Amino acid sequence: MKKRLIPYVVIVAILAALFILVIRPAGDAKKVTRTEFLMDTIVESLIYTKDSKLGDEALTYAYREISRLEKFLDRHISGSDVTKINQAAGREQVLVSVDAMEVIIRSLEVGELSGGAFDITIAPLIKLWGFGTGDTQIPGEAELSEALDLVDYRQVQVDREAGTVFLQHAGVELDLGGIAKGFIIDKAVEVLRDKGITSAYFDAGGDIRVLGDKPDGTPWRIGIRHPRDRRDIAAIVEIRDSAIVTSGDYERYFQVNDERYHHIIDPQTGMPARGLISVTVVAADAFTADAYSTAVFVLGLEQGIALVESLPGVEAILITEDEQVHITSGLAIQITEDEQVHITAISKGW
């Protein structure tokens, strides 16, 4: 197993978890942008095209696709596929959409590969802690034990041919929050590609997917936020036609007696995962980056790096509690004279 470690480097002020560095159109490329609130977050996009009218039309179709998919995959939306599955837990199979089936099957595969570190039946624990409700709490041992009995991705039965999903026991619930955004923006980018767009950027609350290169033919440059200082960043990552997603303990958390309790729950213990404070995963698609950023965060430094090293086309940047940056073997680091940290791929294709 290979890993590299560099000192933590703080360089410029910024507020977003991941952000795109300022770029300028090349030649006759026109920039078309759009921002909407979807999937309980801000979804920002920009594309480059010679025809701004066609570009705006392409974005309209892409955002329609986001809205369509959200209605299937959000457990908080009445009538969604996920809501129906949860309501029928322990009783009956539920016929689901092709898209929901794809997300669930792929999520179960990640659950298997990560040894359960990524688990879409995490909902009972998320609800117990109160994340997303504004009423957070530290659960008692008895409550945790009861919720943990309901968390196991192997309780999800899928019948591909029939198109149905069944949760084996009452009380088991799916939560696709750790995966849906990535899947959905992948689909939105597919829409843009089908409309002839070759250069685009989508950001759904820190889940970033880029299409092609920047207009000048160079890679997109994405900054990774400092997990302990909202004004600073840790590194700049260059990517092409791929995705980058960060999971951090600073996204949703509360503090009790100076102890930070964040929303990335370890399915094995029911407690917030410890050891890492930020994990950024780069992969060919946002679904993969989204899922494995969570899985690696839960697994911790050594197991997390080992998992990523076993996955073709996947790389990661991990920041530990002592604010050291570790990278997987397919990445290279260059520290410039002004102390900027640049990370680029050296072996895996994305």
Image (cartoon, grey):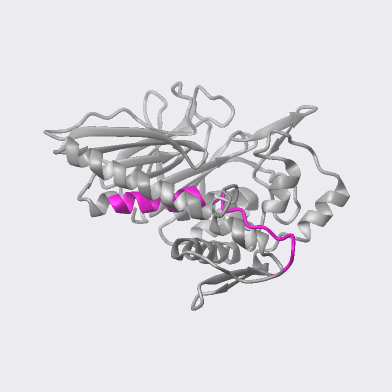
Q: Is residue 316 left or right of residue 129?
A: left
Whether residue 84 is situated above or below residue 232 in the rendered picture: below
Asked if the stretch drawn in magenta spans residue 311, the answer is no
Question: Is 98 or 186 nearer to us in this picture?
Answer: 98
Residue located farthest toward the right when viewing the structure as drawn: 142
Residue located farthest toward the bottom when viewing the structure as drawn: 161
Q: Is residue 22 left or right of residue 288?
A: left
Asked if the stretch drawn in magenta spans residue 182, the answer is yes
Whether residue 86 is situated above or below residue 331 in the rendered picture: below
Number of numbered discs: 0
The x and y percentages for residue 104 are 54, 63
- Residue 327 in view, yes or no: no
Task: Residue at 30%, 42% (x, y): give it.
Answer: 60
Task: Residue at 71%, 68% (x, y): give it.
Answer: 90
What is the span of residues highlighted in magenta in the rendered image? 168-191
Whether residue 59 is situated above or below residue 350 in the rendered picture: above
Question: Is 61 or 180 nearer to us in this picture?
Answer: 61
Question: Is 134 or 7 nearer to us in this picture?
Answer: 134
The x and y percentages for residue 72 are 50, 55
The x and y percentages for residue 127 are 71, 46
Whether residue 230 is situated above or below residue 308 in the rendered picture: above
Task: Residue at 27%, 30% (x, y): give it.
Answer: 23
Residue located farthest toward the left when viewing the structure as drawn: 28
Q: Determine the image quadrant of residue 133.
A: top right
Q: Determine the image quadrant of residue 338.
A: top left
Task: Residue at 35%, 30% (x, y): give it.
Answer: 21
Question: Is 55 or 219 nearer to us in this picture?
Answer: 55
The x and y percentages for residue 278 are 57, 39
- Residue 230 in view, yes or no: yes
